[in-house]
Amino acid sequence: AQSVTQPDIHITVSEGASLELRCNYSYGATPYLFWYVQSPGQGLQLLLKYFSGDTLVQGIKGFEAEFKRSQSSFNLRKPSVHWSDAAEYFCAVGSGRTGGGNKLTFGTGTQLKVEL
Amino acid sequence: GAGVSQSPSNKVTEKGKDVELRCDPISGHTALYWYRQRLGQGLEFLIYFQGNSAPDKSGLPSDRFSAERTGESVSTLTIQRTQQEDSAVYLCASGGYQETQYFGPGTRLLVL
C-alpha cells in the first residue's frame, strides 16, 4: 500500500528565508508525486508534479521539488519565502495508472507560518 | 475555463438526517474523485469514477455513504443517517492530463 509521511507538522520561517518541506513516500513502483497548497477556506491548488524524467521539477509561485528515489523523498523548496506563502502544504503519491484511476494518498500536511 | 465546482459550500445538519453533496467536474474530464478531510488531517480517498462507473469504492467508510455520477458530468455524494464523525470537508477532484487532479473548493459539513 502506498503511504506518505510529512514529518513536520508546523514550520515557521522569516520572510525572505529559504524553505524546505519534507516528504517521504512508500510505493512499490515508480510513483507519481504531487505537492498541493491549501490556503484557509480554499480548495487545494496544484504546485507541481513529478511523473518521470528530470528529477528536479519546477512549479508555480517559485516552488521546486526534487525526486530522490534512493531516499524515497520528494522535498519541496523555495529560495525566498513571501508572506503570502503561509498556508498548508500537502504531499501526495498516486498510482499513476492512466485510465485506471490515480487514487492519491496524502500526507497529513505541513502548516507553514511566515514571520514578517 | 471553469474549474471544479461544489455545492453547497457549507452544510449544517442534524444527526440522523441525510445529506447530498454535489460536484461539477471540469468539462471533458472523465475521471472524478471524492475525498474527505477531517479537521487537522490529510485527505482520505473515498471513491473514484471513470465515466459513470465506479471501479474503486474502497474508501467509502460505511454503507451509509454512496455516490453516483451522471455520464461524465455531475456527481453526488450521499450520506444517510449522518453521524457527528461525518463532520468534515468533502472535496471533489476531476482528473485531467496524466491523471493530474484538480480540486474543487469543498463542502464543509457539520453534523450537530
Image (cartoon, coloured by chain):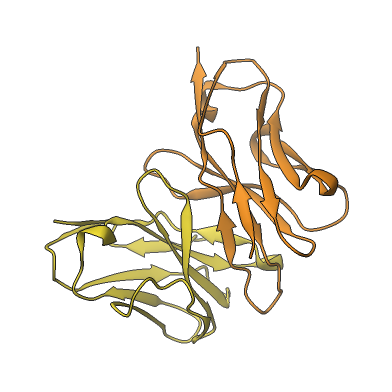
Chain colours: A orange, B yellow
How many marks are shown on the rendered structure? 0
Can you give x and y, in whole percent of width and height, for residue B12 in the image?
Answer: 17, 57
Work out which residue is located at the far right of the displayed protein and give it. A53
The vertical placement of B91 against A47, above or below, is: below
Is B20 placed left or right of A64 in the picture? left
Q: Quick check: can you spot residue A63? A: no
What residue lies at 37% left-to-right and 43% top-to-bottom? A41
The vertical placement of B51 against A40, above or below, is: below
What residue lies at 73% left-to-right and 37% top-to-bottom? A64
Q: B15 or A39: which is nearer to us?
A: B15
What residue lies at 52% left-to-right and 42% top-to-bottom? A109
Q: Quadrant of the N terminus of chain A?
A: bottom right
What residue lies at 66% left-to-right and 36% top-to-bottom? A22
Can you give x and y, in whole percent of width and height, for residue B34 in the image?
Answer: 45, 67
Q: Quick check: can you spot residue B90? A: yes
The image quarter containing residue B87 is bottom left
Is A100 placed left or right of B49 in the picture? right
The image quarter containing residue A24 is top right
Can you give x and y, in whole percent of width and height, for residue A115 in the image?
Answer: 50, 15
Is B19 placed left or right of A28 in the picture? left
The vertical placement of A9 against A116, above or below, is: below
Q: B84 or B30: which is nearer to us?
A: B84
Can you give x and y, in whole percent of width and height, for residue A46 in the image?
Answer: 60, 49
